[in-house]
Amino acid sequence: MQNFKIDISTLVIAIIALGFTIWQGKEQIKHNHVSVEPRFTSYFSTNGKEKQWGIYILNNGLGTGFVKELTVLVDGVEVPNHERGKFYSAINSLKLNPLCFLLGGPRENDSFAVGEEIFLIEAQPENTALAPKSCAKDRLLLMKYQKERLNYILEVESIYGDKFEYSYSNNTQTKI
């Protein structure tokens, strides 16, 4: 009878230990996913020292982000894709001169390495033949419009397949 009591208590302790091991394994998986999560932020910069003037995006997370989709909106309406990119369409929709800006942006299946920063819309250097003299007005309008009229939504995926959506207008990233 005494051996039976020892066997039951051993079984209970083993079941509790197994439960903790399963819980710990699940928590480790969550930790692994979070530890390689890309984290995006985007901002408008007028940093003359760094020769930055425009909209930039940065992956300041701990993992690479793989681009799944980019949606660019002007006044809440999605702009069409253009052979020169969606930000080209956005500049046209905003009635700004595309010659005043260098236009970039990620494409589907591009990746953002940890710490990678790229320009989305950047002002043409003022002293180049490509930038017309009227660009000062367009640059100031872009500074205003990027707060009031321009938005973009970037859908990315981590190496584990976790999906995230970044919104420029409110500078937030959410898991989807």
Image (cartoon, grey):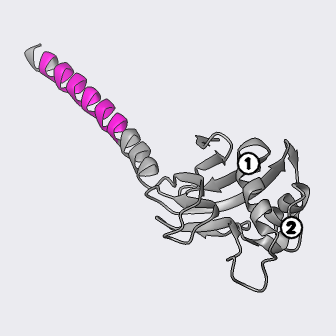
User: Mark on residue 97?
Assistant: 2
Q: Residue 126 location, x and y as percent?
A: 69, 76
Q: Nearer the viewer, residue 162 or 105?
A: 105
Q: Magenta segment, which residues?
A: 5-24
Whether residue 152 is visible here, answered yes or no, is no
User: Mark on residue 144?
Assistant: 1
Instruction: Give the residue displayed 78% in from the left and 68% down from the top.
Output: 135
Whether residue 163 is visible here, answered yes or no, is yes
Instruction: Give the residue displayed 36% in from the left and 45% down from the top.
Output: 28
Q: Residue 59 location, x and y as percent?
A: 52, 59
Whether residue 123 is in magenta: the answer is no
Q: Could you tell me which secondary element the residue under label 2 belongs to? A: loop
Q: Residue 24 location, x and y as percent?
A: 32, 38
Whether residue 10 is in magenta: the answer is yes
Residue type pointed to by label 1: Lys
- Quarter of the image that includes the C terminus: top right
